[in-house]
Every structure is written in C-alpha cells, then in structure tokens.
C-alpha cells in the first residue's frame, strides 16, 4: 500500500512526496482510509514516532474547505511545543492548497496576534486547552461549526488538570461532531475520556497496548541516591556521541541537573514550564539542529519534541505513571534506528522496574555503572576515531604547515602522538583516577574478590568508604593503617572521591592506598597505610582544596573505639555502630577520648 491508494488530493500527495514520505506506517494504513470513508469516532493507539500526526492530519487537510472561514477541525494538545509541532506538520501537508490556513493558538504568546489570524479565517485550529477557553470567553473564536475534534495526548491534558477546560470546549461544539483520540498509551484516565466524550469509537491498536518498540534496548542502573548525578555523568561519558534527552520529574530538578551538567562542561540545556515561550522555542530550535547534545526535560515540556535521530533516553527520575516510561522511551529508536533507554534508580526502586516491565512487555536488564577505566578507554578510542575520520582541507591548512612543522620539530612521532592525545584526554584521566565503583554491593552479594558486603569494602548512606585492615579491626594507628583527621567536611562539599584525589594528587607517580573514609560536617577521618602515613600528612599540610589550606593531624582515637559487629569484628554492613562506637555526653568519640566536638 502507498499514499496514492488512499484517494488523497493531488496537492497533498505532492507535499508528501516532497517531504520524503514513501510508504505509510501501520497506524496510517489503518486510520487514514477509515477517516476518509467513515464519519465515526476513533481511538488509535501506537507508539511514539509511528506517524500518528500524519494519520489524523492528512485526512483533516483533505477535508478542509477553503471557501469557509470558520474552523471545521479542532486539534487539542496539552503543551505549546506539541501544538506548534502539529501545526507545522499540517502546514507542510497543506503547502500546495491555496487558501488553507492552519492556526495554532497557545498560551505564552501574544493573544492579539492569534486573534488577528483567526479573523482572517482558519479551517483547522490547533490549540492548548487554556488558551482556547480564553478565546471562547472573549468571543474571538467560533467552534459551533466544528465537525471533527482530535484529542492528542489526552492523558497528559488530564494530568495537567485540564478536565474542566476539556468539558467547556466540548460543550461548545456540535453534538454530531466526530471525536478522534490518538495516543501512545491508554491509561485508565484516557479510557474514561473515551467513554465520556465518544460514541462507540472504532479502535485501532498498532503493536501491544502501551508496549515499547523492539528497536529500543532497555537498561537500568541501581545506585545509592547520592550517586545518581555521578552515575549520570558516567553514562554520558561512556557514550561520547550521545544525542538524547534526560528526563527529570520536576522543573526544579530539571534546571538543577542542566545547570550542573553545563558547569561540568557538558553540552546541555533545560526545557520546562518556567521558561518563557521564546526561551523554549530557542532551546528546541537549537536542539533540533544538534546545537547541543543533551536536553534535560520534564515529561510535560517534552511533549511535542519531534526529533527522529535521538540515540538515548535517560530516566534520571522514573515517571509517576508507568505508561509515561513507554512514551519517553519511544522518542528514540525511530525510523528503523536502534535506540537505548537507560534508567538510573535508587536502592528502593527495584519494584518499579518490575512494574514498568509488565507495562512495557519487555525485559529491562540491569547494567553496571561504567568504571573510570572503561570510560577513559572509550573516550580515548572516540578521540582516535574522530582524528582518523576528520576531513582534511589541504588548501586551508597548507599556509600553516611549515610553521607547525617548525614548532613540532623537537618531537618524534611517538612523542607527538602522546602530546596530541594528552591534550584532549588528560581531563578524563585526572577526573576518573582512583574513582570508586558506583554499583553498590547488595546484602548477600559478593564482590569481585569473593567477599560479602559485610566483609569487604562498602559505603553507607553518609558517604563512608572503608576496607577491613589485616588485623580484622579498624584502628587509629594500629595494624596496617593510621587514622588522620583533615579539616574538610560536608560544608566544604567534599566527598570520598575528592579526598582520594587530594591525597593522590600529591603523589602523581604512584597510588596511595586509603582505607576507611568518614565525612562529618566540618572535618573528615581517613586511613592511610602506616608506612606512608607521616609522608602523606606532611605533604597534605602544604596543600589546599578549593582555596582552603588543608590541615591534617593524626587521630587520637584508640584501636577499639568501634563496636564489634558481625563475624569480622569490624563494621557490620559497612556502617559503624553509633558512628564511632558508644559516645559519651559532650564528646566526639566513645572510649577514652576526651576531645570536644568541633
């Protein structure tokens, strides 16, 4: 079947051919001939990216009577972005039909300009519910002659609280109108809309209801809540060519994550409802032409984002509605391409993955957060591939070659390669040097060295790192490690990886082994191998962190200040009892210590 077989106007077929459409999608094969032949209500369910807009848009353009000034077709969408996207598509379909006007009306734009466009006449109106109700109350739009109403993304309109607006709009339309509902998902709210506003609708479903695309690989990464942002950065770094969307639950977290990514040097922007329409249009225009790689978005703001070649969708927060996971993920893996949908979840969200799997109808496999060494290797190979495939314009660089050769004459081939690679690559080596594995060791599991999480390394929810010493106990100055106190804590925004990096920065040619790290508000404790302890302390006392002079001194704690717990006599499950063992009133440590709290 091709578009010629539907009986569409020649002008529309010309526009379709110019746009590059060759064969209709499955949802288009079902919906277009039905709409052209039948005057009945319709519910169409298909995954995002399968061509639903063309499925209802092409018949609406075909029905349009340019001799009439009042609109005959009304399309309701939840967001400004989707409203504009639908309008743009319909205008493309109608580009060769003289006098056919498609008018978008939406909040956040000049209402006077929209009223002027409506006065000139419009056969098809695409609207957000709030702005349309405003125009109806002002008497600036006449929808009493509407023959067809399309509810696009009706579930989101309900989630955004537009039920009253939908009621008010539909009450102003004729009773004998057709109502058409097309969506990627069919949650219970949409089913209620179908029963309330539609009469015995014909139903078309492409694929399984709410199912995901087979072109998309689904993975989740379980980390401690505090490690979600570091895990996000690692996923971005392990995919250097990423072009995708990071979804957050709220507009506040969306802006915060985007700001962090930009500060950390990533090519990112945010889109959410607090941005003006001008700002949102600017962000989307830039994203569509790949002006940046990573769009951080809320579910609502992302409606209407129509970009066909996204490589990744990352769920920084899981959606409240399971069906929204399907809708988010469907923005990648379009037009026959492969895509990836990656979720970052905390330790308590495993059950949500199982629930989403049932909705999705696909397995979501667990992945391991990439390690620093893996990221460095991937980035290095990506750099080499870019160099190998770069287009060399001989005429442009020829005037500079003699100067370049003169400046680099002292470097042989091997040295030149090292210098070149280091120029781009050192930032990753520095950042990921000695960074910990973010994948948590769960209860009952064993790490790569055959030890359980209660025996080996672990971190508790306060950011404590540790390794059991050879004597089977933690000890200030006892056994393999000595314990030192440093004048950096949570108020200095220091984390265990920073402390590891601070120490190793002073010893560039070798790796200093740290034991347990414990961070408090204004100070931290860390263990250093006894044979290097004094040397490390001396070097750190002449160092600084973010402009603050570092002060280090050996900790006076006694070897047995930790309560014994578990079979190894050390920390149980990676958490010390009572932080350091039994505290006495007004004292920082239990046992014999008499030092006061800072």
Image: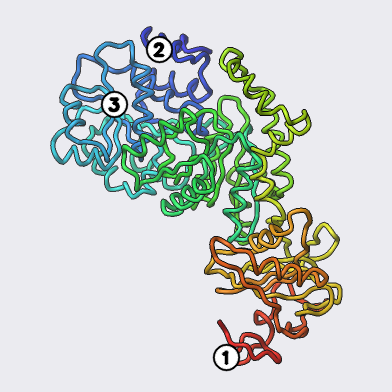
Q: Viewer-nearest of labels 2 and 1?
A: 1
**Quadrant of the rendered structure where residue 113 is?**
top left
- Position of residue 339 in the picture relative to residue 576 (left or right): left
Q: Earlier in the sequence, mark 3 or mark 1?
A: 3
- Furthest-top residue in view? 10
Q: Viewer-nearest of labels 3 and 2?
A: 2
In the image, residue 197 lies at what x, y percent?
33, 40
Q: Earlier in the sequence, mark 3 or mark 2?
A: 2
Inter-mark Cα distance, 2 to 1:
80 Å
Q: How is the image coloured?
A: rainbow
501 vs 51, nearest the viewer: 501
In the drawing, what numbered circle is on residue 73?
A: 3
Q: Is residue 327 visible?
A: no
Residue at the (71%, 84%) spot, across then down: 557
- Position of residue 594 in the picture relative to residue 41 (left or right): right
- Position of residue 289 in the picture relative to residue 513 (left or right): left
Inter-mark Cα distance, 3 to 2:
20 Å
> Element type at marker 2?
helix
Residue at the (43%, 23%) spot, across then down: 54
Inter-mark Cα distance, 3 to 1:
75 Å
Residue contact between numbered discs 2 and 1, judged by CB atoms under 8 Å: no
- Which residue position is annotated with label 1? 586
In the image, residue 351 lies at what x, y percent?
62, 57
In the drawing, what numbered circle is on residue 15?
A: 2
Q: Viewer-nearest of labels 3 and 1?
A: 1
Q: Earlier in the sequence, mark 2 or mark 1?
A: 2
> Element type at marker 1?
loop
Callout 1 crowding tier (Cα within 10 Å): few <14, some 14–19, many ≥20: few
């Amino acid at each position: 079947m091709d578009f010629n077989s539907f009986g569409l106007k020649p002008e529309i077929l010309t526009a379709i051919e110019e746009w590059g459409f060759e064969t209709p999608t499955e949802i288009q094969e079902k919906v277009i001939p039905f709409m052209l032949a039948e005057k009945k209500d319709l519910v169409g369910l298909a995954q995002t990216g399968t061509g639903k807009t063309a499925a209802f848009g092409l018949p609406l353009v075909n029905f349009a009577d340019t001799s009439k000034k009042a609109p005959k077709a009304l399309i309701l969408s939840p967001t400004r972005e989707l409203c504009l996207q639908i309008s743009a598509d319909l205008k493309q379909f109608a580009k060769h039909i003289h006098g056919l006007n498609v008018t978008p009306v939406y909040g956040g734009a000049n209402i006077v300009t929209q009223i002027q466009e409506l006065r000139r006449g419009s056969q098809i109106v695409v609207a957000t519910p709030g702005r349309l109700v405003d125009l109806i109350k002002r008497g600036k739009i006449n929808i009493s002659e509407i023959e067809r109403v399309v509810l696009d993304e009706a579930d989101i309109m309900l989630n955004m609280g537009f039920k009253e607006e939908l009621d008010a709009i539909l009450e102003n339309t004729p009773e004998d109108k057709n109502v058409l509902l097309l969506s990627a998902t069919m949650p219970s709210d949409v089913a209620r809309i179908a029963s309330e506003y539609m009469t015995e609708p014909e139903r078309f479903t492409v694929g399984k209801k709410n199912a995901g695309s087979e072109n998309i690989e689904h993975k989740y990464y379980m980390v401690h809540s505090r490690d979600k942002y570091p895990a996000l950065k690692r996923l971005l770094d392990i995919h250097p060519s990423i072009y995708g969307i990071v979804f957050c639950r709220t507009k506040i977290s969306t802006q915060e994550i985007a700001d962090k990514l930009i500060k950390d040097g990533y090519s990112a922007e945010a889109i959410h409802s607090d941005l003006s329409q001008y700002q949102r249009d600017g962000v989307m225009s830039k994203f569509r032409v790949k002006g940046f790689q990573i769009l951080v978005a809320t579910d609502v703001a992302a409606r209407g984002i129509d970009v066909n070649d996204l490589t990744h969708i990352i769920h920084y927060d899981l959606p409240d509605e399971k069906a929204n996971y399907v809708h988010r993920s469907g923005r990648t893996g379009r037009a026959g391409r492969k895509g990836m949908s990656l979720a970052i979840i905390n330790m308590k969200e495993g059950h949500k993955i199982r629930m989403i799997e049932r909705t999705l109808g696909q397995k979501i496999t667990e992945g391991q957060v990439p390690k620093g060494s893996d990221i460095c290797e991937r980035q290095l190979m990506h750099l080499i591939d870019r160099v190998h495939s770069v287009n060399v314009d001989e005429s442009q660089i020829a005037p500079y070659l003699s100067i370049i050769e003169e400046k680099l004459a002292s470097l042989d081939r091997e040295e030149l390669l090292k210098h070149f690679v280091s120029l781009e690559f050192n930032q990753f080596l520095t950042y990921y040097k000695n960074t910990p594995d973010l994948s948590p060791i769960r209860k009952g599991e064993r790490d790569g060295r055959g030890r359980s999480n209660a025996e080996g390394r672990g971190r508790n929810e306060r950011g404590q790192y540790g390794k059991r010493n050879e004597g089977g106990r933690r000890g200030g100055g006892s056994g393999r490690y000595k314990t030192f106190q440093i004048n950096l804590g949570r108020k200095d925004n220091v984390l265990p990886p920073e402390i590891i990096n601070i120490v190793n920065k002073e010893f560039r040619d070798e790796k200093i082994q740290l034991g347990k790290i414990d961070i408090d508000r204004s100070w931290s404790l860390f263990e250093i191998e006894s044979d290097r302890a004094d040397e490390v302390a001396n070097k750190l006392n002449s160092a600084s962190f973010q402009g603050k002079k570092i002060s280090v001194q050996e900790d006076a704690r006694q070897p047995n200040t930790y309560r014994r717990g578990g079979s190894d006599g050390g920390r149980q499950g990676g958490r010390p009892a009572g932080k350091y063992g039994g505290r006495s009133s007004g004292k920082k440590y239990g046992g014999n210590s008499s030092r006061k709290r800072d």
